[in-house]
Image: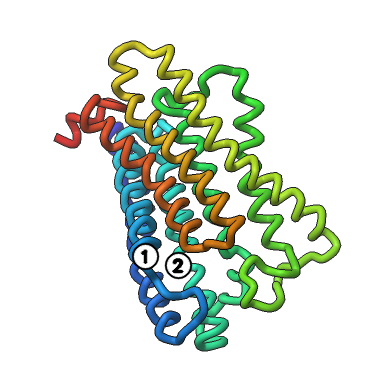
Amino acid sequence: MRRRSWRWPAALAWGLAGLAVLSVVPAFWLLRRTWLADVEGARPTIATVGPVVLAVASSAAVGALVAGRRPRHPVGWLLLGVALSVSFNVLVEPYVKYGLVVRPGSLPGAFYLMPFLYSSFFVGLACAGFVLLLTPTGSLPSPRWRWWARVAALAPAVTVLGFAVQPDPLAPEFLGNPLAVPALAPALLVAALAGMAVVAAGLLAGAGSLVLRFRRAQLRERLQLRWLALAGACASALLLIALVAGALALDPVVLGSLALCLALLPLATGAAILRYRLYDLDRIIS
């Protein structure tokens, strides 16, 4: 019975990881087709493609490893959430552009996926914030963090919903929105912007909580948390760079910075597992 109960979470974890990684293949095929059709903003570069692939592959691999062996620990599933949210965004953007601009009507559902362009990245950022907040124990640093955890969990859902119902979509090259609700759009836009701010603050708060854990930890735990504390600090800096680049309308810099921000956490988690037995998975890897 124990073997069966362990196999199901492992199969689910590796299945989700495979789905995230394999979805990148049709995404880049569609991206190439839109690029050849001279669609504005579709030209891929190493500076944007590299960090995205790294974010998906590292989050999927480390997330599946942790979730498969420690299914009750939330960090593995959160890392898989990062991988799926990034891969969803990478697939949906060229899918919508190909189905609405390059060959209108050729891809089913492209018009209805258009309202969700780019907003899925905030789901990945929220998951990354919770990775920092719940590492290494899988629980909050103290009961005083509960109110913040509830707000941070609600923020990405509000952000996605708020942008999905706007009459003018986030991508200016598309006209109209099949899910638009003009009566609620102004209020939900304010809520969506507030949700974006909470998601960004969640990453900073997670990094801060990790620093507090580091100061209170024993020697072995400090060695485990050192990598993640450094990754949290770098991710916070990259998030600020993305915000500045977004204000300056530098879309490639925004995408590259956010993807690197999300890639740092699974890489740091993997380094801590290999080096300092984080989650006691070093024997499994060996």
Give the residue pinned by disc 1. 24
Q: Nearer the viewer, residue 241 or 17?
A: 241
**SS state under label 2:** helix
* Figure check: 199 above or below 139: below
Q: Quadrant of the C terminus?
A: top left
Can the viewer see residue 9 in this picture?
no
* Figure check: 31 above or below 204: below
**SS state under label 1:** helix
Q: Nearer the viewer, residue 236 or 196?
A: 236
Residue 21 horizontal/vertical position (percent): 34, 59
Can the viewer see residue 165 in this picture?
yes
Q: Which amino acid does label 2 sit on?
A: Leu
Picture quadrant of residue 161: bottom right
Q: Do the residues labelled 1 and 2 touch (CB within 8 Å)?
A: yes
Q: In which quarter of the image is the N terminus?
A: top left
Q: Earlier in the sequence, mark 1 or mark 2?
A: 1
Could you say which disc has been placed on residue 91 in the image?
2
Disc 2 crowd rating (10 Å Cα; few below 14, some 14-19, many 20+) is many
Residue 79 horizontal/vertical position (percent): 41, 43
